[in-house]
Amino acid sequence: MSAAEYKAVMFVRKVLLKKGGRMPLAKLFTVLSRPGDGAEQARNLIGWTQMELEEFLAKRPLFFDCCSSLVSDSAEVAVRRGQRLSIVISESATTAAAASAAAAAAAPTPAQSVNGGEAPRTLSNRCGTVFHCSRLWGIIDLGRHEHVFFDRSIFKHVEDLQRHFKVNDPVYFNAILAPRESRAKWRATKVWKECDRPLVDRMSAAAAAASIVSPLSPSPSPAAPAPSAAVGGITGASSAEAEAQAAEAELCRLLDSLLVGPSPSLSSPVASTPSVGSSGRLC
């Protein structure tokens, strides 16, 4: 068992023990849907739908007692007590899960491979009915010969879709454009039921609120150049120009000395550039 999985199991056990050790499954899902760091970490591993919570609890009989019919509304979950457990916590499972999640995020979506990397067309928070469902995949009917394909890869801990979806069941979904070779026009990225709508709507509203920038928030102003840098640039330019003028004056003096011979004035420093009238020589 990974460390993240152990934390999620202990969190669910703590919630159940606070309620007497037994709770209806629908009420437990409602409690886990509330805001909070612990609940959010548990949801990230368990899943964001009630069916994923059902499968998560059913696969851990050492910790929880579940009724045989998990899909019924009267299903209850209880904590197993009075037993000593030997649990080995490993980080390899967590690392492998993180690596697979990163690889799935880096892989291009089917719509991106079709559209050459452009932003795909999407459907968000749409409703349809289950047209066909098998163990591994299903079809959602939107009417007018428009269908949405989904499979169990978009769910956590779910192995048999027929346990949770029946023909003509209403479902909600988000979808992207499917590849051209697909018979269905859309491919679902998330599917949920009516019982999951409060959590999904709250998460969608929170994401939309986070993406909105308030007009009253101060906008970052462009950085103005430092005055010292500007003054330093002007000073550097003036000193370079003075050096160029001094070099040009020294060159004229040397040419004069080469044409008419050495002059006593060469040993003394030159205060100014010699002129034609004062020296009597042609430069």
Image (cartoon, rainbow, N blue to C red):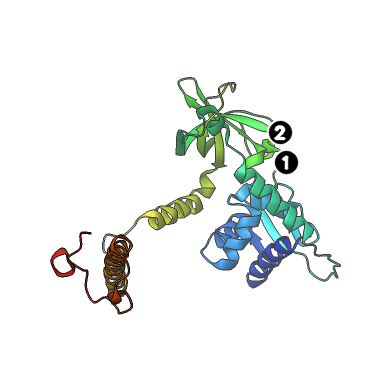
Q: Residue at x 21, y 73 (%)?
A: 272
* Left or right: 192, with 253 as reference point: right
Q: Residue at x 59, y 49 (%)?
A: 49
At which x and y percent is residue 229?
Answer: 32, 71
Q: Is residue 188 above or below residue 75?
A: above
Give the quarter of the figure containing the N terminus: bottom right
At which x and y percent is residue 93?
Answer: 77, 56
Q: Residue at x 63, y 47 (%)?
A: 51
* Left or right: 269, with 10 as reference point: left
* Left or right: 174, with 216 as reference point: right
Q: Residue at x 57, y 61 (%)?
A: 40
Q: Please identify the residue farthest to the left as the structure is shown.
A: 277
Contact, CB < 8 Å: mark 2 with mark 1? yes
Q: Quadrant of residue 265?
A: bottom left
The numbered mark at residue 184 is none
Q: Which residue is mark 2?
A: 135
Amino acid type indicated by mark 2:
Arg
Residue 196 visible, this orientation: yes
Amino acid type indicated by mark 1:
Glu
Among the two numbered marks 2 and 1 on one chain, the one whose residue lies closer to the N terminus: 2
Q: Please identify the residue farthest to the bottom as the structure is shown.
A: 268
Q: Which residue is mark 1?
A: 159
Neighbourhood count class around disc 2 (C-alpha, 10 Å): few under 14, some 14–19, many 20 upward: some
